[in-house]
Image (cartoon, rainbow, N blue to C red):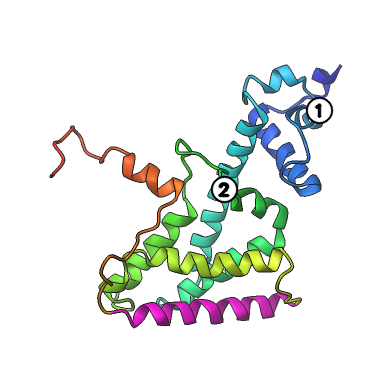
């Protein structure tokens, strides 16, 4: 029986691992929850105790992948020898090389709706980037007037390069050359931001599912308080 083949102590984790393997083999949409269950060696009914649908499994896997990426970005920046914009370049290199190394899984979280407003990802890559830009502003590397929304400018640059590479619209065969091109892109983007001394009037502020969730989260504190007008 299939149940006898299952020896994992964590069925939920095993299903997530099976789903990630299937994503690499067949893409985001080329498999079913039943197939993920079969990979683990359990019946679909057992999988439904953890995931009510394939979409729930995909969303949960996206959360795991994003948290893993967040840790990778943070650890890469912390290992950077310099404390200025070089750390931001290290973040960009880590993001782009991650996508190139694992394009199928990258596409999983790149597409819209990968996570929901209820998804709690920690550390979220967006938060890692905003924390670093805050640090660069506090250290005087980035003017305070340029800080609002800067994370979307930097993200658009590095994400754009990552997508161009994994979709085959841009070809850079050597890993070192990919890192060099990423560094050039990040420094050019940062230098452009550093020339902004004051926010432009009516500058649009983009949002994501994650940032909208953050704005709806209650403010931390020991007791409820009345928000300021």
Q: Residue at x 40, y 53 (%)?
A: 207
Reply yes or no: does residue 193 show up in magenta: yes
Image height of 1 relative to 33, above or below: above
Q: Are marks 1 and 2 in contact (CB under 8 Å)?
A: no
Question: Between residues 30 and 69, which one lies in front from this camera angle?
Answer: 30
- What range of the chain is rendered magenta? 174-196
**Which percent across, then down, holds residue 164?**
66, 68
Q: Residue at x 46, y 40 (%)?
A: 120
Q: Residue at x 43, y 77 (%)?
A: 190
Q: Residue furthest front?
A: 202
Q: Earlier in the sequence, mark 1 or mark 2?
A: 1
Which SS class for mark 1?
helix
Number of residues whose C-alpha sits closer than 10 Å to that of mark 1, classed few (under 14), some (14–19) or many (20 or more): some
Number of residues whose C-alpha sits closer than 10 Å to that of mark 2, classed few (under 14), some (14–19) or many (20 or more): few
Which SS class for mark 2?
loop
Reply yes or no: does residue 208 show up in magenta: no
Q: Quadrant of residue 142?
A: bottom left
* Residue 108: mark in rendering: none
**Which percent across, then down, holds residue 156?**
51, 66
* Residue 10 appears in the figure: no
Prevailing SS of the magenta stretch? helix
Callout in the foreground (1, 2): 2
Question: Between residues 227 and 222, which one lies in front from this camera angle?
Answer: 227
Q: Give the residue at mark 1.
A: 38
Q: Residue at x 28, y 76 (%)?
A: 143
Q: CA distance from mark 1 to mark 2?
A: 28 Å
Q: Residue furthest right?
A: 1
**Which percent across, then down, holds residue 220?**
26, 40
Q: Give the residue at mark 2.
A: 112
**Which percent across, then down, holds residue 26?**
80, 45
Quarter of the figure with the N terminus: top right
């Amino acid at each position: 029986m299939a149940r006898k083949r299952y020896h994992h102590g964590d069925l939920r984790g095993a299903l997530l691992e099976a789903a990630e393997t299937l994503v690499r083999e067949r893409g985001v949409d080329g498999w079913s929850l039943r197939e993920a269950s079969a990979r683990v060696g359990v019946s679909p009914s057992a999988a439904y105790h953890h995931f009510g649908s394939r979409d729930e499994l995909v969303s949960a896997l996206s959360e795991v992948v994003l948290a893993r990426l967040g840790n990778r970005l943070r650890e890469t920046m912390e290992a950077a020898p310099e404390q200025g914009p070089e750390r931001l370049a290290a973040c960009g290199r880590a993001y782009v090389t991650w996508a190139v190394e694992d394009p199928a899984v990258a596409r999983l979280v790149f597409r819209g709706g990968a996570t929901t407003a209820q998804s709690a990802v920690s550390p979220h890559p967006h938060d890692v980037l905003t924390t670093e830009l805050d640090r660069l502003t506090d250290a005087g590397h980035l003017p305070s007037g340029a800080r609002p929304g800067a994370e979307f400018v930097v993200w658009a640059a590095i994400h754009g390069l990552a997508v161009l590479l994994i979709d085959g619209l841009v070809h850079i065969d050597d890993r070192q050359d990919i890192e060099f091109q990423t560094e050039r892109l990040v420094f050019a983007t940062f230098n452009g931001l550093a020339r902004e001394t004051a926010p432009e009037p009516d500058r649009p502020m983009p949002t994501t599912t994650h940032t909208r969730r953050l704005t709806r989260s209650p403010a931390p504190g020991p007791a409820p308080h009345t928000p300021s007008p």
